Amino acid sequence: MGYNWHKITNLVSLMIPPRISKKTAIELGINEDRITEAIKYKKSDIQIRILIVMNDIHYIENISLKKCNSNVGFNQIDKRSVETYQAMWGFNNSIANTLKLFTGAISPIVPKSQLRDTRRMYLTEIDIIKVDELVSFLNINKTLICMDILKGRGAFSADWILVTQFNIEDEKLEWVIKDINFVCNFYASGDVIITQNGNLKLGRVSIQRKGGTPDPTSLQFKINPLELMKAKLV
């Protein structure tokens, strides 16, 4: 993180709960006017407070934790309704309808006999003009999107991502910590494409219909955190 540990007089680590009440947010030092944003866009799991001997000022670092297994690479990093993402990113109703067809939030507009899944439409089954409109928007806004789904906003946004992997065979723990701006640029790098299965890839980020309970028609963003173990920007 760039600190000189000889200058640190006190180090406090606090766990940030997955779900935060307003009372807890206030106890963690969040201004009441900023609580809603902090809770809605939270991405950090641990907060570290560092006291430097030279000036008695506390520096705060928020860390997002990703625990991985070598055989399970992908990790859900964000999941919300299409309407929520539309409010966040400001895309038009045409793009919103395309995403709702993709997630099944609205019923398919072609006969069920033409669909792989009668509950929704894959992007390869939707009008190419509508899909191109979606892809164009995602390409233009890749950086904004990756910042929101990886860093978040407000007081609980992440400054760092810590990835850990435990190798059962040699009982070795591997880890890497990366600055959040590096992480966002790394996962945003690459084009937005439609996969052969009819899903979306935004750089190194997979975009899918969530499926399952309790919110099957949500839009889901996934990454493979293990890619950060050897990540380099080109």
Image (cartoon, rainbow, N blue to C red):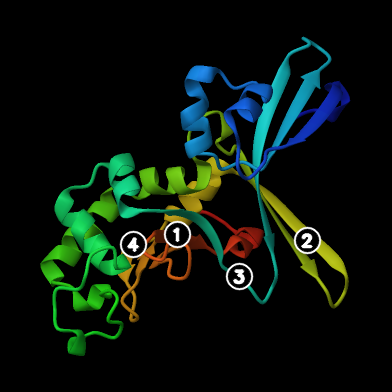
| Quadrant of res 232 | bottom right
Question: Taking 81 as reference, is 124 above or below it?
Answer: below
Q: Nearer the viewer, mark 1 or mark 4?
A: 1
Mark 4: which secondary structure?
loop
Q: Earlier in the sequence, mark 2 or mark 1?
A: 2
Residue 170 in percent (x, y) is at: 87, 74
Q: Residue furthest top?
A: 55
Cβ–Cβ under 8 Å for marks 4 and 2: no
Total labels drawn? 4
Residue matched to label 2: 174
Residue matched to label 3: 73
Q: Amino acid at mark 2?
A: Glu
Q: Earlier in the sequence, mark 1 or mark 3?
A: 3
Q: Earlier in the sequence, mark 4 or mark 2?
A: 2
What is the CA distance from the residue labelled 1 to the residue labelled 3?
Answer: 14 Å
Residue 91 in percent (x, y) is at: 22, 47
Residue matched to label 1: 221
Q: Residue furthest front?
A: 214
Q: Amino acid at mark 4?
A: Asp
Q: Amino acid at mark 1?
A: Phe
